[in-house]
Amino acid sequence: MEVDEDKDKDSSKEGGTDEQDADKKPPVVTVDIASVRRAFSALFKIPDYPFQRALINALIILSENLEFDFKYGNKQSVDPSLLNIFVIVMEIPMMECPEYMEAALPAFCKAAALLPVRSQAVLARTWSTFGAERLKEMLDTLHQFITLRVIVGQFSREYFINDEESVIAATKLMKILFYASLLGGVVEDPELTNEDEDLGETDENLHDLLGARAGPESKDSQKTKEDPLGVELNIKPIDCRSPVLPFEEFYNEPLSDQLEMDRDFAYYKTEGGKFSFMNYSFILTPAVKALGLYYDNRIRMYSERRISVLQSLVHGAPPNPYLRLRVRRDHIIDDALVGLEMVAMENPNNLKKQLVVEFEGEQGIDEGGVSKEFFQLVVEEIFNPDFAMFTLNPETQMYWFNPTSFESDAQFTLIGIILGLAIYNNIILDVHFPMVVYRKLMGKKGTFYDLLDWNPSLCKGLQDMLSYTEDDMENVFLQAFRITYKDVFGTVLVHDLKDNGDKILVNQSSKDEFVRLYADFLLNKSIAKQFRAFKRGFQMVTDDSPLKVLFRPEEIELLVCGSKNFDFNALEEATEYDGGYLSDTPIIKWFWELVHEFSLEQKRKLLQFTTGSDRVPVGGLSKLKLVIARHGPDSDRLPTAHTCFNVLLLPEYGTKEKLEERLLKAINYSKGFGML
């Protein structure tokens, strides 16, 4: 290692010591990684590790000295040779062992956490070349350390996990590994795939669409927090199609479960306050991030409610603290869209009030359950082929925007508002969009990679073309730069990807261009008008939300559609009982025996009956908090439910057969809200 340091010194002398030269030439890690690994491999073959105590003490002293230097030295400039130390230490084979985790690793993490952003970027670029296996080993070491500290920590309402310096330091070091995983993966060029700039040039404002007083979203609302390390590396998580390690590998469930999200959210909203894990959202599970989003949405709702009350006091008008929609079941789309259009015309900020739905002629009071059914019915109608706003791919059962729709842009804007309201009001929808829709909502263009999810057959055909290497491509494929596609009515339409495209055959030199133009037309240009209006409506509700900061497209789909894991064992473990029922009451045992024997469709219907939605919430059924309450002795009454509170009211039937008959009838023929 001394030889390496000397080499570093020599190389630094050759490169000059002038600070301006250092700024022009970013520092690099010069250590020979292969030699380091060979040295550690030979060292740790010595029986009983007689050097271990000395090594641990050396690591502690070294880390403390580095921490002191970074705290009180020049924070903007770090000697490149010092970065070699961090690479070398992370190569120690036994860092996950208790002896090292007790003192050496915490001290090392605290020193690493103080590295300036530029030096962090150098480490990220270096580790991005290490491959999945080595990155996974380093990540597992940090996960093991964080999990250990979370489990043994004595946390309370006075001492939070946000106060644990060693966990914070390890999380900051893990962020460098996170960006290393991004850099080493399949990354798209942001300049070629960002869509926001294109949309901004051609956007009409909301006045043109809805006749409203509202204009485009403010510049302030478009600003989102950017991670300094991401800015330095010029990369965002959404730019990476396939990281070295799956994003899910960075979730730490014990940390997420222990986190007091209400406090963490408060720290997140306070500039320069305590450390917030929401700024390091890669380590948090989608369930706990959804909870953070819930707090943000509720605070906005309460804020709008207070503003409404204050305005009523000042101007004398009756208070209007909620977003109220009154709809008829047989005209639900017309009533919903007209109602939302009136709100958007008057004041789009009213969309950020808490939604309250009332079905005309029904007595249900909306504490959440009525809204759930409202959204379910609206979604069913929106994707009805009679409306012809979306087309269905029969192969994937995914919906896509109809490029030849006769509906106005305002209609698509209002559909976007409905999707945004569902997220804003914490309601899961039964929608079937391909992932590219969520990527486009996050500001990315659709590309060839997105075709696999939406239209696998087309994607395979284009992939075959890209893989073909013979010189007779023109004769084999006979494909010109003119394409055909069908509208929702089955009419065949043609489009030239280039001028006189029908006269230009695709060859080896132009096949990449053809595939790029083909995908760009289908996923972007052909539906630009419809999607622009849809996205605008979505942003009217979510523009001030930390949605883009906290969630990736896959996680937003999870927010919208819920989990696909119907684990009813987890639901049984999480269910609570009331009115005299216990987990070992005979009817409760019968109930779960029947439920576990249900088909998937019957399980969906049971969820719909008891909660108002047949979707699984983010985090799984264990997050549902179902309550089964006794509803009198044996009788012929059907089970009933308070969907607003996830309460199932179950009479104490005398036999398992009667319970099955009554329960199946209830879940199969229930609809609407009336007096129980």
Image: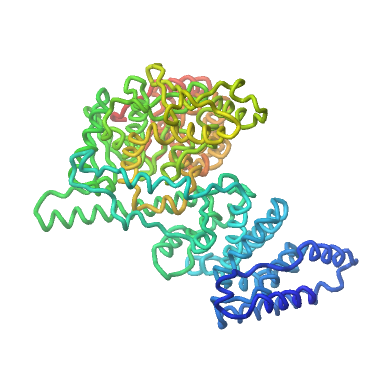
Q: In this rendering, would 305 be left or right of 167?
A: left
Quadrant occupied by the N terminus = bottom right
State whether residue 445 is above or below residue 302: above
Q: Residue furthest bottom?
A: 72
Q: Quadrant of residue 444?
A: top left
Viewer-nearest residue: 173 or 198: 198
**How did the renderer colour the structure?**
rainbow
Residue at 50% across, 22% down: 660
**Could you tell me residue 12's position as x and y percent?**
67, 76
What residue lies at 42% left-to-right and 46% top-to-bottom?
A: 443
Count of labels in the image? 0
- Provide residue 16's location: percent of width, then percent of height: 64, 78
Q: Is residue 363 above or below residue 250?
A: above
Q: Which of the 4 image quarters holds residue 536?
A: top left
**Observer-nearest residue: 420 or 631?**
420
Estimate the x, y position of residue 113 in percent, counting from the top left. Answer: 58, 70
Q: Residue furthest right?
A: 47
Q: Quadrant of the C terminus?
A: top left
Residue 661 appears left or right of 467: left
Q: Is residue 578 visible?
A: no
Asked whether the viewer can see residue 603, the reply is yes
| Residue displayed at 41% across by 45% down | 195
Q: Return the x and y of residue 58 as percentages of the image width and height.
A: 75, 77
